Image (cartoon, rainbow, N blue to C red):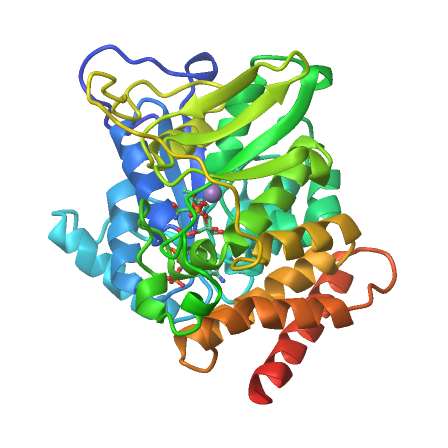
Amino acid sequence: MTRDDDPLPPGPIRPTDGGRRRSVSLLGSTGSIGTQAIAVARANPDRFRVTALAAGGRDLRLLAEQTVAVRAEAVGIATGDPAQLQDAIDDAARAAGRPGQHRPQIEQGPDAAARIAAIGADVVLNGITGSIGLRPTLAALDAGSTLALANKESLIVGGPLVKAKAAPGQLVPVDSEHSAIAQSLRAGTAAEVRRLVVTASGGPFRGRTRDQLRDVTPAQALAHPNFAMGRVITTNSATLVNKGLEVIEAHLLFDVPMDAIDVVVHPQQYIHSMVEFVDGAVVAQIGRPTMAVPIALGMGWPDRVPDAEVPIDWTTAADWRFEPLDDEAFPAVVLARRAGAAGSTYPAVYNAANEECVDAFHAGRLGFLGITETIERVLSEHRADGQLSVDTVLEAERWARARAQQLLASR
Ligand SMILES: NC(=O)C1=CN([C@@H]2O[C@H](COP(=O)(O)OP(=O)(O)OC[C@H]3O[C@@H](n4cnc5c(N)ncnc54)[C@H](OP(=O)(O)O)[C@@H]3O)[C@@H](O)[C@H]2O)C=CC1
Ligand SMILES: CC(=O)[C@@H](O)[C@H](O)COP(=O)(O)O
Ligand SMILES: [Mn+2]
């Protein structure tokens, strides 16, 4: 999907892959990861060309502007009217001074993102939120694309299925902690790894007791100390469910046992995560708390993108803190370890129950502590059944969502 007539910036071009720019399909293009990925691609037109976009369909205007800006050849929406999207693209094209020039292939429906992924690109960046990202993840792998994976939920719920499809090196983590671990692992061999240390901000409620968490509001939960992210992951950072998911994610990505993956609270999030080697050496990846490097490296892997991030100014004084997790106030990581160790459909159930609870919390139907209480209850009632397949995962998710809803209704 390389196009030779694209404008390139003046000056020397430093192309990767033997002179070929990478085509990139961006799933979840209108979200936090998606918009940042477009910025990375547009800042590096000699390296990346965004050829396809997919989104849920809630913001057709933004999606249309993106389509025109990157000159996408294919666009997908899960919901919404394709004719309305084309109208919005026509408006955006007129505003850009290129009226009538944009007629991308438009896919619509619940599987639109998977169809966009199946078109094939050098890199598919999955920045969809939630386990709905599973089929697009599998489609990208089937198409032979490198999968730059921000959508951690698809790996959590479909772990063994995703891993079975991924060729060596085909799956590149974009989640900041896992990007940091992947970078730190370059310092040694797999046999030399002793532990992984995943850092956690602790979220906006760090330091509070369980009792002090009882009445916190959705608005307070959305005030992440360091990152501007989507609603679900930001809420998950507040409950520490995000860290629970990330422990399972690290276990699946790096084949390190769950009990050799530690979590340490590091509120400043300058250390993105670490690897401890057998000789006691610890290698960490350090940088500003932004997604610029994980996204750029995810799309360019294994090549680094020059100037992706402003380096830290070491002449400025700073204190970095480290604290243990408070498992009593924030039981999400303990529960995730339980689900991850049980394997099969348990991680999918953990995630699905959480997704229901996050919605209920924001709708005012559930208190903050009720999120992990409900996950624990649904997990404890789950019985894995049969061999793992996409169908058994989806069935377990359906069950978990329905059971979570029953529990919410009875609270
Ligand atoms: N934001 C961050 O810094 C980080 C995010 N991540 C992970 O990356 C993923 C995305 O997070 P984030 O960008 O914050 O989330 P956002 O909520 O900001 O964005 C989600 C994107 O997914 C799209 N989407 C939702 N449903 C579908 C669907 N069925 N088909 C196609 N697209 C869909 C949304 O479109 P629409 O709005 O139209 O529904 C939107 O473009 C999550 O898995 C998160 O855990 C990981 C590390 C950091
Ligand atoms: C940027 C990123 O990768 C997020 O997962 C972020 O790190 C959230 O951090 P906490 O969950 O530790 O608050
Ligand atoms: Mn993360």
**Residue drawn at (49%, 65%) of the image:** 210
Which residue occupies the foreground of this view, 26 or 225? 225
Task: Please name the residue shown 62% across and 12% down the image.
Answer: 188
Quadrant, the C terminus = bottom right
Residue found at the very far bottom of the displayed protein: 410
* Up/down of 361 relative to 180, above or below: below
Q: Residue 263: in sight, yes or no?
A: yes
As drawn, is 207 to the left or to the right of 396?
A: left
Residue 64 figure quarter = bottom left
Give the x, y percent position of residue 17.
Answer: 47, 17
Give the left or right position of residue 403, taking residue 88 as reference. right
Q: How many marks do you count on the picture?
A: 0
The relative height of residue 214 versus residue 289 in the rendered view (above or below) is: below
Q: Nearest the camera: 345 or 197?
A: 197
Placement of 6 over or under 406, stated as above or below? above
Answer above or below: position of 288 versus 395.
above
Q: Nearer the viewer, residue 284 or 300?
A: 284
Q: Residue at x 43, y 48 (%)?
A: 202
